[in-house]
Image (tube, grey):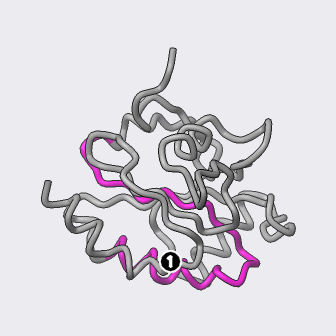
């Protein structure tokens, strides 16, 4: 059966618990592949700021650590969770480390990449902190490259929050 929305998937949170994406139905989602040792790691600050400011209006930021880009997130889930919390005050949901590219890519990311292709129609995630904006209906609205700072996505998020 082909997937039609992000709600069709299950993921594992950073504590190892199964989580249905359907639990986020009705929320605007920003799904991000993250890394602890990347030049873009300070974006955790902007993501946390968006979470704090827009969370009560229906935004959920979901972080998925990935170690596929120059070994920039080699630690286990517990260490990653502590790093994000201690260094950036992250209290938005973080998930178990996954692959976003290749044969072992998580099915959620296979779906996201197919729904919102990157530069020149590529489905491949190019680097850490690629962001996918999801509507309240679970549809992929847009992909943002790693260079896009979280704060610059705020107006797009607010537009979705109003719909």
Where disc 1 sits, the SS reads: loop
Report whether 155 appears left or right of 75. Answer: left
* Extreme-top residue of the structure: 1
Give percent across and percent down for residue 76.
79, 59
- Image point (28%, 50%), residue name: 27
Label tally: 1
Report whether 115 appears left or right of 41. Answer: left
* Extreme-left residue of the structure: 162
Is 118 colored magenta in this rendering? no
Identify residue for label 1. Answer: 148
Give percent across and percent down for residue 106.
67, 39
- Image point (66%, 71%), residue name: 82
- Say which quarter of the image contains residue 160: bottom left
- Image point (60%, 81%), residue name: 86
- Image point (50%, 77%), residue name: 148
Dot 1 alpha-carbon crowd within 10 angstroms: few under 14, some 14 to 19, many 20 or more: some
When the figure is inspected, residue 163 is found, relative to residue 22, above or below; the finding is: below
Report whether 152 appears left or right of 75. Answer: left
Give percent across and percent down for residue 53.
28, 77
The magenta stretch is 25-52
When the figure is inspected, residue 17 is found, relative to residue 56, above or below; the finding is: above
- Say which quarter of the image contains residue 128: bottom right
When the figure is inspected, residue 31 is found, relative to residue 73, above or below; the finding is: above
- Say which quarter of the image contains residue 110: top right
Depth order, front residue of 113/87: 113
Give percent across and percent down for residue 113.
57, 46
Report whether 143 appears left or right of 139. Answer: right
Depth order, front residue of 25/13: 25
């Amino acid at each position: 059966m082909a997937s039609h929305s992000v709600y069709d998937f299950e993921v594992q949170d950073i504590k190892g618990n199964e989580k249905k994406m359907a639990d986020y139905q009705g929320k605007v989602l920003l799904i991000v592949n993250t890394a602890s040792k990347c030049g873009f790691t300070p974006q955790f600050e902007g993501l946390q700021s968006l979470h704090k400011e827009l969370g009560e209006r229906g935004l959920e930021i979901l972080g998925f650590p990935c170690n596929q880009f120059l070994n920039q997130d080699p630690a286990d889930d517990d260490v990653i969770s502590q790093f994000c919390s201690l260094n950036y005050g992250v209290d938005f949901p973080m998930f178990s480390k996954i692959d976003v590219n290749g044969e072992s890519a998580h099915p959620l990311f296979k779906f996201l990449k197919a729904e919102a292709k990157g530069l020149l129609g590529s489905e491949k995630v190019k680097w850490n902190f690629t962001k996918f904006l999801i509507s309240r209906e679970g549809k992929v609205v847009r992909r943002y490259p790693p260079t896009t700072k979280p704060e610059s996505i705020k107006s797009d998020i607010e537009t979705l929050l109003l719909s």
